[in-house]
Amino acid sequence: MIKIKFPDSSVDDYEKGISIIDVAKKIGKKLADDAIAARLNNELVDLNTKINKDSKLRIITFKDDDGKEVFRHSSSHLMAQAIKNLFPKAKFAIGPAVEDGFYYDIDYEKSLTPDDLVKIESEMKKIVEDNIKIEREVVSKERALEIFKDNPYKTELIKELEDEKISTYKQGNFTDFCRGPHVPSTGKIKAFKLTKIAGAYWKGDAKNKQLQRLYGISFPDKKQLNSYLKLLEEAEKRDHRKLGKELDLFSMHDEGPGFPFFHPKGTVIINILKDFWRKEHVKAGYTEVITPMILNRNLWEQSGHWDHYKENMYFTKIDDQDYAIKPMNCPGGILIYKTKLRSYRELPMRVGEMGTVHRHELSGVLAGLFRVRCFTQDDAHIYMAEEQIKDEIIGVINLTDHFYKTFGFDYKVELSTKPDNAMGSDQAWEKATAGLKDALDAKKVKYKINEGDGAFYGPKIDFHLKDCLGRTWQCGTIQLDFAMPEKFNLTYEGKDGKKHRPIMIHRTIYGSIERFLGILIEHYAGKFPLWLSPTQAIILNINDSHIKYGEEIKKKLEQNNIRIETDFRAETMPKKVREAQLKKIPLILTVGDKEVKNKTVAVRTLDGKIYFDIKPENLIKKMQEIINSKSSEIRF
RNA sequence: GCCUCGGUGGCUUAGUGGCUAUAGCGGCGGACUUGUAAUCCGCAGGUCGGGGGUUCGACUCCCCUCCGAGGCUCCA
């Protein structure tokens, strides 16, 4: 689908833009056809004037992705103009809208500082006040090259274009080579903030010159900007690195950058995630294996990792032979497959592995639990016949859906197709890709296609989790693989008594337990649902005379596998409650004279509700109910 | 790996122009025996990430290095 936007200057409002698809739908007439044809042929026509005559067109507002993009793109130009005013020697590269705002890459002799950002912001404000008209002008390629002759980046881009006519946008003293569309004037951009400066390579290639990328965010009004800034603040509060420390879940050390240490409480959660995973996979017909961490060079040569993945691997020597620490689990699993002749009756063969892998990631990419150098994949390999692809994929999609729903995650699905450096025949790719598509369609899953983004050995489906703040994280993946079975000469004996080659699926649901834990910490803001909570309840006493009874309660809960702490210090109640709250313990149980007398406890939940006179048996029963339901709500 | 910024007791943090470095929380000791978000008093704890240099003198200035943050590239 082609989507082209341009501003509708008939409506004097910043929010208005228009989608040509809508034009086509609404008028379906020659006008739209002409416009689309012109675009496809890269003939630039001035669409504004023609379309103005039709008033029935849909208006795109800031609420639409299209409108947002136009608005943010114009914000980028606004920033560029301000930069030009302040730093006339800066050369502009590209300045698009991105999902979370906009940026402009510039080439400037001196590094800009956060102070400069403040200056640029004030300059932008001036330009907004001046409400400068933004005008489109279509010029010849020659003329464009003349206009941008001092700018090597724009020159390069213009030369790459096949069009003979080039559109430019002019606002005051600043002219940019740009397809548009833009808001009609700078005065429309009422609220913005420049957020950060970073290095970025020209055209995203590390071999090219590194430019300075200035990021910003903008909105049509202050209110929206403020709520966005609030969201950022909330995200910062939930940062798993901060909460991980505060809640005593894990730590990082200079002695092992990228290698997380999990404390007792973090380990509790990880073990629960693993237990849950095992139970569900047994139900889904998986077996589980364990393969070694260090394996001989020969294996990695055969799998292709030695040639294609070496820079990401760690090595060691044993008795003068080269060994590698596994960066992936599949070669080990394949050796198990090959321990005997396999029959078609065994297929599909679903083999899981909680496989810990080590990857030498670049130091600059490490980030808390989100990007580490040692992590455990909830891996599984499914060996199957070609005709089983669709059903197996459906099975994995169902399982994945069940997992994500359990944690309250929404998710998006992406399908990646054949890349340029692919191995295997076109037919095989087509079949495999069709298998993935069929499965997604059968499940009525909406998905986005990433052309050419598949692995070299097969197409894949990726699952992107959406957390409660709307941020997305790549976790699960389903990858079809025809390469490994080939390389390891995997076979099975068919009904016909002949040898056949199985197809392999690599798949994960959590992705990495470490990353998943990081996401969970931020998703729940550290307030884990009862079933995941490292400490499920804490017992507080009013004074020393209640300790004995408190110990009795503790024992009862422990005997029912409830993770319980006590705080019998001679501190005041408010203080002990406060500390328990800060630790985000779901249930605070208090014992005082009344409870000792009635043989009950008082229960306080994290949201501050208090229930008195709860019998311990009832408490245990209720807690077990909530734990079993995996609910994040606690009510008595 | 590259770019920019940062690193002060367990945590959060003050600090200066180059002289014996703040405070709170936490910890420990004591008093208080407390009914749902911080009781009071006292004590201990830092070679200011590490190494080198400039200097009479460096937490402060310079260089190197390690680690972290945000990006780029990559990715579970």
Image (cartoon, rainbow, N blue to C red):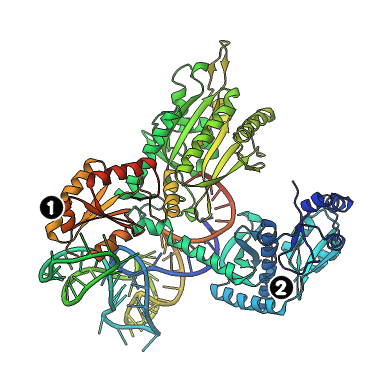
Amino acid carrying mark 1 in the image? Lys
Amino acid carrying mark 2 in the image? Thr
Cβ–Cβ below 8 Å for labels 1 and 2? no
Label 2 SS: helix
Q: Chain of mark 1?
A: A
Q: Is residue B37 left or right of residue A122?
A: left
User: Foreground: A355 or A549?
Assistant: A549
- At x 42%, y 44%, the residue is A513
Residue A508 seen anywhere in this rendered image of the structure = no
Q: Which residue is label 2 attached to?
A: A186
Q: Is residue A104 left or right of residue A30?
A: left
- At x 31%, y 44%, the residue is A622
- Mark number, residue A548: 1
- At x 76%, y 58%, the residue is A18
| Residue neighbourhood size for the residue with mark 1, other residues' Cα within 10 Å, grouped as few (<14), some (14–19), many (≥20) | few
Q: Position of residue A625 (x, y in %)?
A: 34, 42
- At x 58%, y 39%, the residue is A461
Q: Is residue A595 left or right of residue A156?
A: left
